[in-house]
Amino acid sequence: MKKLLFVSLCVLMMVLAATSLTAQNSRDRWKYDDYFPNDYFSKDPTDYRLHVHVGEVIYYMRLADVTPLFEEKQGAGDTLLRLNYIPKFAHPLFIQVRRHHGQIRLEWQKGAATRGHITYSMYMEPTDTGYVDATEKKYYGNSWEKGILDSGGRALTWDEWNRIQQILTDIDFVHYKHVNGCWGFRTPFLLEYADQKKTVAHYTECPDEAKEERLAKLMVSLVNPQYEDMVVYSVNKKNGIIKPQYPGGEAVCKQFVETFVRYPDDALRDMEEFTARVDVIIEKDGSVGYVRDVSWPKSPYGFSDELIRVVKTMPKWKPAIRKGDTVRCYAHITHKFTLPKKIRPQYGNPILETQRDKKRWEDIEACHRKLLQNPLDDEAILWMGKYYYWEYLLEHEPVKTPTGMDSSYYENDWETFYDRTPVVIHPGDSALKYFYKVLEMNPTAGTILHLYLPVLQLEQQLHRTHNPLAELPFDTVEDVHFPFTYFINWPEDSILDAAQDYYIDASAWSSFFWVEYFSEVLTKMKEPVLFNDSLHGDEATFRFSFFPSFDPPVSFRVVKNKSKVTLYWKILLTKYDPNSWKEISSTVKEGHRKMTAAQYEQLLQYMEKIRLDELPRSYYVNMTDGAQWVIERKTEQGFKAYFTNVTGKNIQQVYSFLVKLSGEKLEYVKEY
């Protein structure tokens, strides 16, 4: 019995909790920023569009700092009537008439914010049980500028007030339902009325001509008769409007757009296609008025701007007709930007295209599809940049003599492969664009290894000035013994060859990778940085570093200060975990001794044989052994270093000489 009672009590508590939660959701489901009571315009949570549209109007009221009417308390004999008139793509108009202590005053303001499209997640989000408030408002296609374009106020005459009162009495506005569910007018009216007894509001997008539209027109005319033309109609089955007509019909309108529209250069470069859509206000005289982009999703390539430009140059239309009178009305124009056929290679023609053409185009298209699904796919972005880069190199590559392997691979197409144009246009611009994006998204050492030279090459050849590499904190001498780019063998004129594939250039790879390793080892040895050291007169410093694959690294430093010459040597001894091969600890074995004048002179003779000044900054050959030699010299005239993984007799002679002077048993240095 106790068990049954306990179960019943638990069930009752769950029911009460669910009821409380449902009630809370009901109270909180539709909030209008305290402008109106909850669920004022609709108690149906599925009335999705209504709540969005009303919320949109209230947002504009907030921009204009309109005071919520339900918060005001009217005194005896006081009356306040307000019209919130917010046409689409035009400036909102707020008018209020207040009677207070026998005085009647008209006030208005014309807002600076224009009304465009707002996504339907503005005030609510779907859940399993319906819709709840959304804290994030998502807008697009709007001008959210606060401010007032026009405002003013004046006293109303009793005659003007009586005309307003007469209409209120005729239409019995205070007993109106809160909302008229007719859609399609797209120029919402929000009428509010308050006296001592009651505060009411009415929202509609299709005001009745004999009722609320009659009242609205009177209030607008009291402010400025010119404002009556703010109404813009849209064609639907109920309002009986004859839609505006382009001279010659829709086919001629389409032909006009296709004739004068220009494909955006950036879109051609990146092979982007897009369907642009605009709404146009056709004025009473048929001229093209306001034009607004309503495309969704948006495109960064300027498709909509180009369509708007062409639409604004259109001749006059035949205006819309409503009950025999011309009216302002919306027209909708759509244009699909499709890549010209000449941009796409025509496969299957062995004279014009090659198998490589087709393969490259398919690779680019595959990346393009990935980026449409995920614009932040860093792998697809990198490959797109590489494909464009290699097409750019093709533009500048001289005609080659095909080899037998090329002939067999491309069969009958190899001749055109060696003398052809890229399968895309603007490949260099596109490559640079994607490389910039890669560097922005993933500025790791690996990225920089591959992109440093290609980016500089493209910037030089395309005369670009923006270099995101300069914004990355890797090319510095603060905590490294060499700048990261030091061992790159730059051309004498510093101009990178337009046809050279620097993406696979070993010089850059070795520079970035080995500089980091050299700095790490020399730092553990507590060796000074020679690159930015200051020397004077005949002072000089030489350093000879050896980084073997399986033996301790060694560094010899010869310092000449006036007539004194000293040899320093350091050996880095590191212990590793035999299981994980991780470093456990490291110690430095070091020593120093004076060098005689004869010994120093011998060293200079060895250096003369090496001809350090004539050597490039690096000479790196891909091979299995990872031993590296680095020679540095710092004098008052400057700094020079040489790095190689392939030593010769003259270099080996110097290292053997220094090992002998140190007295250390470093046979692996002499015998390597």
Image: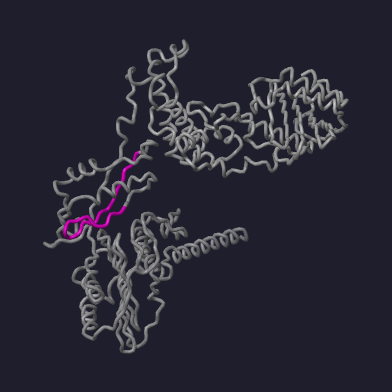
Along the viewing direction, whichever of 4 and 367 lies nearer the viewer: 367
Relative to 670, does residue 517 appear above or below in the rendering? below
Q: Residue at x 40, y 13 (%)?
A: 411
Residue 423, percent from left and from top: 38, 27
The quarter holding residue 112 reads: bottom left
- Image-quadrant location for residue 207: bottom left
Left or right of 495, for residue 190: left
Here the colouring is one colour
Start-end of magenta stretch: 273-292
Spot occupied by residue 571 in the image (x, y as percentages of width and height)? 82, 30
Q: Is residue 573 visible?
A: no
Q: Main secondary structure of the magenta part?
A: strand
Extreme-left residue of the structure: 324
Mark yes or no: residue 392 visible. yes
Report the number of discs: 0
> Which residue in the rendered view is the most extreme toward the top?
404
Of residues 297 and 344, which is closer to you in this image? Answer: 344
Across and down, in percent, residue 152 comes to 32, 76
Q: Quadrant of the N terminus?
A: bottom right
For the residue pair 557 and 318, the one nearer the viewer reads as 557
* Residue 58 higher or lower than 411, as above or below: below
Q: Quadrant of residue 494?
A: top right
In the picture, the quarter occupied by the C terminus is top right
Q: Position of residue 555 (x, y in %)?
A: 79, 30
Q: Which residue is at 23% across, 50% downward?
A: 313
Residue 34 located within the stretch drawn in magenta: no
Q: Is residue 100 above or below residue 372?
A: below
**Residue at the spot x=65%, y=20% of the render?**
623
What residue is drawn where x is 82% and y is 32%? 570
Viewed as shown, does residue 51 lie left or right of 171?
right
Q: Nearer the viewer, residue 392 or 259?
A: 392
